[in-house]
Amino acid sequence: MPPNVPAPKPTKPYFFYGHRRPSQNRPVVYGGLFSSRKTITPQPPDAKTRHVPTPNFDLHKWDPENPLHPHSPAPKSSSETFFTASRNLSPIARFITDAFRKNSGRWGPQVVSELNKLRRVTPNLVAEVLKVETNPTVASKFFHWAGKQKGYRHTFAAYNAFAYCLNRSSQFRAADQLPELMDSQGKPPTEKQFEILIRMHIDANRGLRLYFVYEKMKKFGVKPRVFLYNKIMDGLVKTGHLDLALSVYKDFKDDGLVEESITYMILIKGLCKVGRIEEMLEILGKMRQNLCKPDVFAYTAMVRLLVSEGNIDGCLRVWEEMRRDGAEADVMAYGTLVTGLCRAGRAEKAYKFFEEMKKKKFLIDRAIYGVLIEAFVSDGKVGSACDLLKDLIDSGYRADLGIYNTIIEGLCKVKRVDKARKLFLIMVQEDVQPNFESVNPMLNLYAKMRNMDDFSRLLEQMQNLGFSVLDNLSMFFLSLVNEEDGTMTALDVFEDLKVRGYCSIAIYNILMGSLCKTGELKRALSLFEEITSSSFKPDSLSYSIAIECLVETGSVQEACRCYYRIIEMSCLPSIDAYRSLAQGLCRIGEIDATDMLVRDCLGSVSSGPMEFKYYLTIIHVCKSGHFEEVLEVLDEMIQQDCPPSIISYSAIISGMCKYGTIEDARKVFSSIKDRKLLTEAECIVYDEMLVEHTKKKTADLVVSGLKFFGLEKKLRRKGCKLLGS
């Protein structure tokens, strides 16, 4: 029978009780009653038993970008962030960071008095605090304060933590000065300190700063290892400083170091990226002679890099070198090469490599078939593309939507719309859901052939497949009018579709806009009249296009009525409509109306025309009395690719009539004429506009004065007596 063993006594709660054994000098606690520094308020008895139901978490409804979403994590306050960061700190380190927090992250006498309560701050404690500190100013002050302690010397860990702290706060230039600081404090930097700085600059893609640290490393007489040399050269190559990387490689050779395979590959990739193939082949020859031949993975990386840079000739030379070294290309290498050749328009060459893949019985991916089919269609070899589609299906693949759309487009380009229609039916039978790109080439070809019966049958089939026919027709007309002589074809098709019931306000707007751009203003206005007389209601875009056409035809008053219709609809005209209406108002001398229109546009639209912004600038310059600065504003407009127009000259007239004189305005226009910005005839026209606008403003002032003094009625009576007599 075993002897009676007394039960172990329960652990007595103690202040230093924690997850690891405390030391005599400084207790370190990770957890326990006093580790969180939070006051625990006792819950009422009923709160402990009451169960609060929580909503079930749904991953599909989770939105990490929206902190207010019920399934998203709630944003943490500053105090919660502080306690989370300091949870794993020792009590004394937590005391120091708490002193920083209580003083709002500012270094001052209060922080120093708090720190003076401590008997001593060790270098490990300094490093522990700097690892979590985010304020670079406070971190620097604390670092230098700790260094002033009697008999204290910073360790490498403290310097490294200080470097990381400065880099986190984007103070990398200050971090680069740490080697000098270490040397001045009797702690010469080692390779490890420079490696930390180099890694920081590599992660942030700061190539020039990386080379600056490397040069400083040489000044201190620190020679990097092969590993660090490779890191430096790789960082310089990735940031586009190949010449600097080659100079580092020269230093590498001067130090008597032996290259590794990664050393050669870094230089080879850098030379491939800039297209220096001859130098790359020299490095490749050195690699074969001194170390080993590159394997298929290294060659694939070279091919991929050259393909991304569009250097297909260099890619083929690398492929020949791979064959020379006896490296057997795999599917990845072939696929990268075939894709690059297809995108460069060399489909025939790509197809030869494709046949090599088939001879080697590689498992060819469907994406390779897709790029080959697209390349053949681009070259006009639709028959070869169809053969590849048949080969794809025979290989056990199903063609995807992109492949079907590419071949349909190619068949329509060679006017074989019947085969394109059959392929479309096959695609539907294969349960491949077509989209607009599937039917647009056929619709386009039917429209150009004036085959409206097949056009309508295709529309009916689209409707049966669930297409939004009117939306797709809008996209069809938009693509058609962008082609050469496509507007007239679009009008003919539209006339036929109206009879069949396919019509919408969006299609009207597309046709009106195209006619307006091509100068067919009367036809565009006839379409607008057709809209107003039909069951459709014009929208803001319809009125905006009508404004442009009406202004060009000289019907500015009618254009103003269209503008007010848009305002009544609580909408805004287009920017082109604003600019066109302002020019029309300026032509008929309605400068006050132009001023109101410009201010309304800039107050309603976020990005108004540059002309309108300079309009207000010119008036402001006239208001300040510095009329010679008007010419400087016009020069600035020319530099900003916004040449002065009738709107700018109307701003000069408006500003001079309000804040200057006719003579000042004439001086400005004379200077503009001397700069060859205006002709003599245009100056005469603007002078007449200036005189007329001045008369209007003077008459308005007279009428306002009569109204103010109550003399308007007496003037009317005298006028009536004179007429009666």
Image: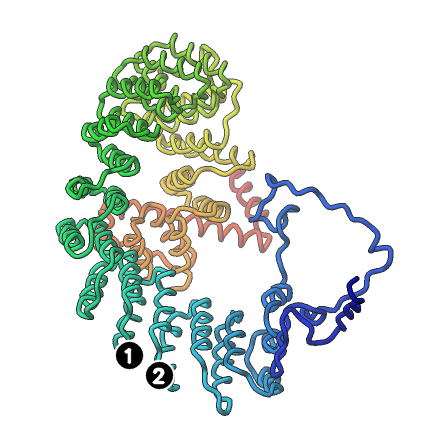
- Residue 181 in picture, x, y percent from top left: 38, 82
Nearest the viewer among 455 and 334 is 334
Asked if residue 596 can be seen in this view, the reply is no
649 and 706: which one is in front? 649
- Give the quarter of the image for residue 296: top left
88 vs 501, left or right, is right
Going 22% across and 48% down the picture, which residue do you hit? 294
Residues 7 and 499: in front is 7
In the image, is 706 to the left or to the right of 83? left
Residue found 76% across the figure and 66% down from its top: 40
* Circle 2 Cα neighbour tier, 10 Å, few/some/many (<14 / 14–19 / ≥20): few
Where does residue 392 sit, x and y in percent of width and height? Answer: 33, 21
Residue found farthest to the front = 1
Residue positioned most to the right: 45
Quarter of the image holding residue 104?
A: bottom right
Q: Residues within 10 Å of mark 1 (few under 14, many from 20)?
A: some
Q: Is residue 333 above or below residue 136?
A: above
For disc 2, the marked residue is 183
Q: Which mark is residue 220?
A: 1
**Kind of residue indicated by mark 2:** Asp
Q: Is residue 329 above or below residue 221?
A: above
The amino acid type found where label 1 is placed reads Phe
Image location of residue 689, percent across then percent down: 35, 46
Q: Nearer the viewer, residue 47 or 302?
A: 302
Q: Position of residue 576 (x, y in %)?
A: 39, 38
Marks 2 and 1, the one that precedes in the sequence: 2
Q: Which quarter of the figure is the N terminus placed in?
A: bottom right
**Can you see residue 21?**
yes
Q: Identify which residue is drawn at 60% across, 43% down.
A: 62
Q: Residue furthest toward the top? A: 453
- Report the Cα–Cα distance between label 2 and label 1: 9 Å
